[in-house]
């Protein structure tokens, strides 16, 4: 049988990285690779009680029946109130659609906005899952220059901005770098978007994981007509529920509802109702600070290990929130090549090249710290430091070629 | 703000039918329109117990964490054994991928197989949700002639079959007609597929709802290399879980796994585990006969009402399973136009035209019977019968134009 795949399916490359990452799911591996939240933060008891409550009443029938494509009304209403209050703005339930994890939002947005060859602006580097979703709709990526604080807004010309289908940006504790876009750059970007009719896709799965609890204003509050905001319950409740949401102009939400209908009809009614019952009475206000505390302490511990063990020519980000630290190695070290060697030493990470839409940088990598206990963080960082030193030395023994 | 929608998004029409159907969700409406299973069949207590079990053990952490894109291993293994036994064939877990409802399977299959202008073969009429998913990838539909038993396989030339990306077919108790493809036509179709390298997409959400419990062999057992089989838990457990599955050649499953990863990463871990625990010890063998019994009795009741009240020039299908009856009206009656009048009389149905990929027939409609109590079935059929008579009479008073 010869499979007649579509061009977009034929263009899919099996990701070498993902293949390697599959291998590493061994108990003796120290993995800084996964982007998983810590299961210690999952509100197991609250979810159990919520499910019991739903399944013991007539709500069980709604939880098990087909439901509205845009999501169940009480959850959308709750989110509208929560976001309006949290971000000092005005969001209505009609501006909200529930999705099956915010990965689905990325897919639906690609479907709604990308024609073959459409220009999509992305950060340097950016989230791999975003690239994977958009790529299926065959855009042309334009990587916008970024520094350790995020996008360099002034490097984006009005001409390019006005030609783009949209710009994809993760302002808070970005995956993969952990960086947070400063307030003034947000304002610059929002102004540029309004001036050039640029759509911003603001992906914000990590925004609540701010170690200081000091939230910077979201782009969707600064340029509300231009911004599609993506939120997620994966990092503040549990990713296995696959629950996220989109906030946007009603015109756009209406279009997305049509697209979601043919994508999966609707997000499971049961998981939506569970989430609603868990969070409706202020649970997140009590729960999120505990996650922040745990992640902050793991992050600080990894930062202290990096400072203690890494050679001088390695630099890393100093996240103020989120789940990731980004390392820059000396330019001649190829992190992708180094991964196999690291895995032999029972340590894993994600090589940085996978996060670039164009012109991948090879000498960088992402470390995730939230699921790894402190003693393993220390052991893993020591092993990586030795590897980096070894490869740095290899170079010093070679003739210098400029 | 001017939204720069993709061509595929611009081509989406707001479905008039769906807009009307939204209006009809009133308690005093007799709706034969929805395609919902009866909530009386939902195994509420079993789902409650399964959830309790999961949430009271360490399995809770797996149920709430990210999981594999292809679905959880025990559910895939269970399905492989169940299908192998039920259909007297050999299916391995690697041939199975879990999806977020089989609507997602339709979307992923469109993504994997359709280029702009690809030829997609469909039945006449066919499932609206299939058309909605595939249409986003801009195929050219070829409607294959069908009669009251389903596809007329001999009307499909080898030339057209060999040019097509795939053929979409619902052999068991089709939505919308309720018809079941006879065994000899299945064999003909399987032979043709093998001869012409045609991919068959066999959508089977209703196959278990066979009133006699007499299953006809599936296409995927006859032409295993050519067939992508879609199964669903929506009609045998509960649609609110959004759980379906795809059975296909491993080469195809591997490609679909890549596509699903960017669509929603994976189907919720919690709902998969709930379904697994409910069904793993033979529950379906006890449960499905009860659903069949209920649906059979509702179907027979509606058929008896149709026989009692309908004028002679109305004909309808005689389903041996499933959830739908199909009505053909005299050719001059436009069922879409009639719907508004029916709604004024508090009865709803789905006009047939919406189920045609090409050249819609206007004088036909779909009736769903499983969620409507008997007294309402009788009242609703009486009202419809009066409407049809009125419109039939209108014609008789007009001059006959040939």
Image: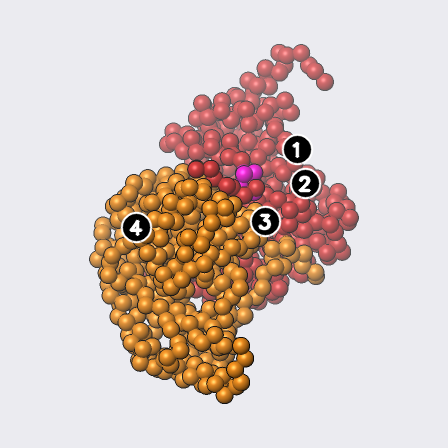
Chain colours: A orange, B red
Q: Is residue B9 magenta?
A: yes
Image position of B341 with respect to B39: above or below: above
Q: How many marks?
A: 4
Mark 2 neighbour density, 10 Å: few (under 14) some (14–19) many (20 or more)? many
Q: Is residue A173 magenta?
A: no
Report, in whole angstroms, how far the alpha carbon at label 4 lies from the one at label 2: 53 Å
Mark 1 neighbour density, 10 Å: few (under 14) some (14–19) many (20 or more)? few
Give whichever of B353, B327 is nearer the camera: B353
Q: Main secondary structure of the magenta part?
A: helix
Q: Residue at x 23, y 55 (%)?
A: A285
Report, in whole angstroms, how far the alpha carbon at label 4 lies from the one at label 3: 33 Å
Image position of A146 with respect to B234: above or below: below
Give whichever of A313, B14 is nearer the camera: A313
Report, in whole angstroms, how far the alpha carbon at label 1 lies from the one at label 2: 9 Å
Question: Mark 1 — residue?
Answer: B359
User: Which is more foreground, mark 4 or mark 3?
Assistant: 4
Q: Residue at x 56, y 53 (%)?
A: A140
Can you tell which quarter of the image residue A77 is in? top left
Label 4's element? loop
Mark 3 neighbour density, 10 Å: few (under 14) some (14–19) many (20 or more)? few
- Label drawn at residue A217: 4
Question: Mark 2 — residue?
Answer: B143
Q: Earlier in the sequence, mark 1 or mark 2?
A: 2
Q: Label 1 is found on which chain of the structure?
A: B
């Amino acid at each position: 049988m010869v499979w007649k795949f579509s061009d977009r399916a034929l263009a899919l490359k099996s990701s070498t990285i993902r293949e390697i990452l599959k291998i590493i799911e061994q108990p003796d591996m120290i993995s800084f690779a996964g982007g998983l939240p810590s299961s210690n933060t999952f509100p197991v008891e609250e979810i159990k009680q919520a499910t019991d409550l739903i399944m013991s009443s007539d709500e069980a029938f709604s939880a098990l029946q087909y439901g509205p494509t845009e999501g169940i009304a009480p959850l959308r209403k709750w989110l509208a109130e929560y976001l309006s209050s949290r971000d000092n703005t005005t969001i209505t339930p009609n501006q909200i659609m529930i999705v099956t994890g915010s990965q689905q939002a990325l897919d639906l947005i690609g479907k709604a906005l990308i024609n073959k060859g459409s220009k999509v602006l992305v950060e340097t580097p950016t989230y791999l899952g975003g690239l994977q979703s958009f790529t299926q709709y065959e855009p042309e990526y334009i990587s916008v220059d970024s520094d350790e604080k995020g996008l360099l807004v002034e490097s984006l010309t009005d001409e390019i901005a006005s030609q783009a289908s949209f710009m994809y940006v993760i302002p808070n504790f970005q995956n993969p770098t952990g960086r947070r876009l400063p307030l003034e750059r947000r304002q610059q970007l929002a102004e540029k978007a309004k001036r050039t009719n640029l759509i911003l896709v603001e992906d914000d799965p990590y925004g609540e994981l701010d170690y200081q609890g000091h939230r910077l204003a979201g782009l969707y509050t600064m340029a509300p007509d231009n911004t599609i905001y993506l939120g997620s319950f994966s990092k503040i409740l549990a990713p296995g529920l696959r629950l996220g949401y989109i906030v946007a102009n009603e015109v756009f939400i209406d279009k997305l509802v049509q697209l979601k209908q043919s994508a999966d009809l609707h997000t499971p009614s049961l998981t939506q109702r569970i989430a609603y019952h868990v969070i409706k009475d202020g649970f997140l206000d009590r729960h999120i600070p505990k996650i922040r505390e745990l992640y902050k302490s793991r992050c600080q511990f990894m930062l202290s290990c990096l400072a203690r063990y890494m050679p001088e020519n390695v630099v890393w980000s100093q996240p103020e929130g989120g789940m990731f630290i980004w390392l820059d190695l000396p330019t001649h070290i190829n992190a992708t090549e180094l991964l196999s060697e690291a895995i032999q030493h029972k340590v894993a990470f994600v090589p940085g090249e996978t996060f670039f839409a164009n012109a991948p940088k090879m000498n960088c990598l992402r470390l995730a710290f939230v699921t790894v206990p402190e003693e393993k963080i220390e052991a893993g960082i020591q092993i990586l430091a030795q590897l980096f030193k070894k490869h740095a030395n290899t170079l010093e023994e070679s003739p210098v070629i400029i």
